[in-house]
Amino acid sequence: MLVPLSWLKEYVDIDVTPQELEKKLFDGGFEVEELYQVGHDIDKIVVGLVETCEPIPETHLHVCQVNAGEYGTMQICCGADNVQAGGKYPVALVGATVYATAKDHKTIEGVMTIKKGKLRGFESYGMLCSGTELGLTEDLYPGAGYNGLLEMPADAQPGADVKAITGLDDWMFDISLTANRPDCQSILGIAREVSAMLEKPLKMPSTDYTETEVKKDGFKVSVEAPDLCPRYSAHYVYDVKMGESPAWMKRRLALVGIGSISNIVDITNYVLKEIGQPMHAFDCSYLEGNEICVRRAHEGEKIVTLDEQEYTMSPANLVICDGVKPVALAGVMGGLNSEIRDTTESVMFEAAKFARDNVRKTARALGKSSDSSSRFEKGVDEYSTVLGMKRALHLIEELGCGKVSSTHVDVNVGNSIEPQPMQVSIHKVNSVLGIEVPAEEIVRLMKNLNFNPTVEGDVLTLQVPAYREDMLPEGENDVERYPDVAEEVIRMYGYDHIKSTFMPSAQVTAGGYNKEQKGELALKRTLCTMGAYECMHYSFFSPSDLDLLKFPADAKERFAIQIMNPINIDLSLMRTTLAASMLNAISRNEKQGILDGRLFEVANIFIPKNLPLTEYPDERKTLCVGTFGAKESFYTMKGIANGIADSLDVAFTYEPIQKSFLHPYQAVKVLCEGEEIGYFGKVAYDIQDKLSMRASAYVMELDLEILSKWYDKKRTFIPLPKFAEEKRDLAFVMDKAITCGQIEDCIRKENKYVKEIKLFDIYEGGQIPEGKKSMAFSITFVPKDEAFDDARVQKFVDKICAKLNEEYGVELRA
């Protein structure tokens, strides 16, 4: 929320710097997102008196001698059509900064620094400025909208600071307010807090006005939905004189981002920002039936709002109607059929409290939002409703734009706007804070906050202001229990008074990661070292993803939890596999032109114990790895799996598996010490085509719940071998059904000196019998106690060949 310092000073005598006030606001629980001066980009601009002004022949330029007071008299060339001798204008001195404008002299294109220059042979030592070049508009300063030089007041002294004259030296606070303080969604609300922080009296805005005996005969107001509108006030104003608002009002509205429209409309906007009460004014000449009715809309009923958009409503929407038709969307926007026009002669002012949830739902359902709806959504109290109406009527009288009649109807459910008493224990307040705040100090602080406190023994009696009542959902008060009072006390007393201490039952803990967290972090680091990037996806997926992966009807993956209120159908099921999200991620990357990569995700899958749910599902931590690109293959994925195994100091084994979405001959299940922990393989070609993949993709899923058993496995280090390693390359001929894993297991079991086995070739075709294949391995033997000679290594080879022949009928290829 934007809060001008000059507007705050209307209600509080602020005697601290803007920076000091910013800190006090922060200490009091109000985050100032930004503090800036209105003219923060403007510098070194002073008042200049043009003493002489001579035209430059055959140009639109004039050469002027400008008196800038203490800065001296300087020559400036100027092309504005309203420059003249005796005129006083803003002068940008050499080195000054102003806004650069486009050729239309209205559009700002950045900030520029004024330099000494020469125009048509004449030296120029500065620049005479327009309002636009100073960042001013007609609403911010009268005359700034003219496409020429900005004229300074006749009594302005040459050399005086233009920022001080035009209000560019004002400061703006952009304050972020928490949801529990809607009472501060106004200038007056912030002023109340500043008053308490500075311990300065609050000067309330004037709300007096004089009613005439003129009445609007027979006018009535009815509220058919008091649950959605607990208070509705209407007041008749006649003899309206439409026109412009005074400069001070237009300036304040402009500072908070609202443009001036007309005096009547500006008053409603002014009260919205000053008091925090949204208001509306109806042109009485367009109200039929001499009445206002607040009711739920009829099904299919239509309204055209002030922005000329038509909306179809339902009974979920609250509308303001005259005797015939809807004339406003309650709390959102008025209707075009009752807007204030230049011809308006009488108006009906509206101030109301609407249910915040209904306004929010209406605004979202219709795609219509406004300053009023934003305010109502946060909560408006009935105290502000009454105060806002009085303030608006005072402004009508102050601006002389109408006469206030005695016709005033206030329909409400009987809620009081008087302070409500409450009692709390001072001991309990201090027990929440953990420090001892003296009773007299609590009284002083709560008095500053307008709670009118009294103390008798341990009992603190407060009068809760009406603007702090009924502000939270379900009618709860912002301040109604001792913890609420403790919060009010400490934010004013100062959080720096709280000292860090242990609770009586507290114990010092070592902290740090547990076994699972350490193991998971190590696993992620391992994958990163292999060139993989971590990705994150929603915990939901689409029923179409299950169809994409061709899971059969009885597959466990289809036994998924359905979301009751999904964002959309694509996020309607809790994930039972991470593979679908990974394949979609690979597809998106390829569509963006990224044709190779490695990705991984660590996340939960959700396995229900029964459906519909009667207990929490089993959430299993799972790792999914996806690779794609011309350099990736089944064996690079196997290398990633082996890298994971090596990092845990375990060994994985692999056996063929059939998966509905994987290549039938390039898919394996992964086992660790005989226990199945997952799978990996190449994505089936038809699925790659459906996802428009341009390169082969591979996917792996591992159950980390099982794998976590080896997270804290003690790693055993052995010294480097003293003797040289021996390598032998062997090619074996075997049946096609025999796997690489079976061969490797047999070799390791047969010889304890085998350190490493690498498959480097697979061959089928000529010289190999039908139904057979050739697999070539590089086997490394590591001596332990003595060096190996060729004869001993040959014995190892012979025994390995004999064992392979015995177990699988494998022959050494000649």
Image (cartoon, rainbow, N blue to C red):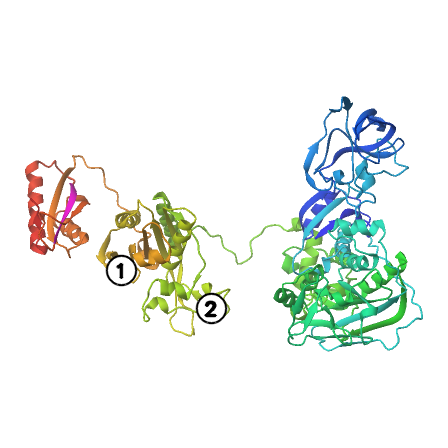
* 244 within the magenta span: no
**Above or below, comparing residue 468 to residue 530 in the picture:** below
Residue 188 drawn at (x, y percent): 78, 56
Point out the residue furthest to the front here. Answer: 58
Which region is colored magenta? 772-780
Q: Is residue 396 left or right of residue 310?
A: right
Q: Position of residue 217 (x, y in %)?
A: 88, 76
Local crowd at mark 2 within 10 Å, few (<14), some, or many (≥20)? some
Please report the residue visible at 90 percent of the width from the left and 37 percent of the height from the top: 154
Q: Which percent across, then down, holds residue 638? A: 27, 50
User: Which structural element holds mark 2?
Assistant: loop
Question: What is the x, y in percent for residue 626?
Answer: 35, 52
Q: Earlier in the sequence, mark 1 or mark 2?
A: 2
Q: Nearer the viewer, mark 1 or mark 2?
A: 2
The mark found on residue 676 in the picture is 1
Q: Quadrant of residue 555?
A: bottom left
Residue 677 lies in what quarter of the image? bottom left
Circle 1: residue type: Glu
Which element is circle 1 on?
strand
The reply to whether residue 464 is in sight is: no
Instruction: Give amino acid for label 2.
Output: Ile
Q: Main secondary structure of the magenta part?
A: strand
